[in-house]
Amino acid sequence: MLRYLLVFLALSTPAFAQQFAYQAPETPAPDMWVAGQSGNPAGRPVGARGRFSQQFIEDMRASWERHGATVMDRVAVEYPDRYLGIAAQTTCRSP
C-alpha cells in the first residue's frame, strides 16, 4: 500500500504533470487546406455507385424470375409487417 502511495505522490508532482499536460495543437499551415479542394482527390471512381445499383437490380430480376410470387406469398403470411413495409417503399415515393 505504501508503494502505491509513493508512486501516486511521485506522479502527482508538478514536474510530472507539466511533462504530460495537454498541449493544444498548433494551428495548421495556411496552405494545408485549400478552399474548394477535396480531401480525397482520388475519390470514388466515376460510375462505381451506378455499377453497384445496376448489378443489384439485375440480381433482383434474376431472383424474381426464380422465386417470384411464391416468396411474396410466403413473406405476406410469415412477415406481414415486412411485406407491408416493402409494398410501401416500392409504391409510395415522396417528391
Image (spheres, helix red, strand yellow):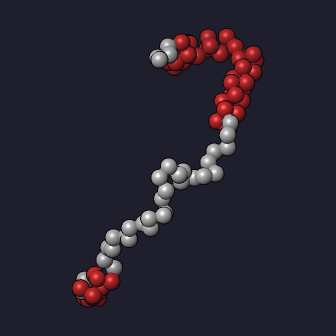
From the viewer's perspective, tell me whether residue 44 is left or right of residue 62: left
In this rendered view, identify the residue nearer to me: 30 or 73.
30
Provide residue 67's location: percent of width, then percent of height. Answer: 72, 17
For residue 34, side relative to residue 10 (left or right): right
Residue 12 located left or right of residue 55: left
Q: Is residue 47 above or below residue 36?
A: above
When asked about the image quadrant of residue 5, the answer is bottom left
User: Residue 64 placed where, x, y %?
Assistant: 71, 17
> In the picture shown, does residue 62 fall above or below 49?
above
User: Does residue 51 sit above or below 37 in this rendering?
Assistant: above
Give the total number of marks visible in the rendering. 0
- Please tell me in which quadrant of the rendered image residue 47 appears: top right
Measured as percent of width and height from the top left, residue 82 is found at 51, 19
Using the image as rendered, state which of residue 63 and residue 53 is in the foreground: 53
Left or right: 2, with 47 as reference point: left
Residue 84 visible at all: no
Q: Residue at x 64, y 36 (%)?
A: 49
Q: Nearer the viewer, residue 92 or 24?
A: 24
Query: Which residue is rendered at x = 38% and y = 67% of the image?
Result: 27
For the question of whether residue 42 can be seen, the reply is yes
- Which residue is rendered at x = 65% and y = 16% of the image? 71
Q: Residue at x 47, y 52 (%)?
A: 35
Where's the N terminus, which quadrant? bottom left
How far from the left and from the top, in percent, is residue 9? 24, 86
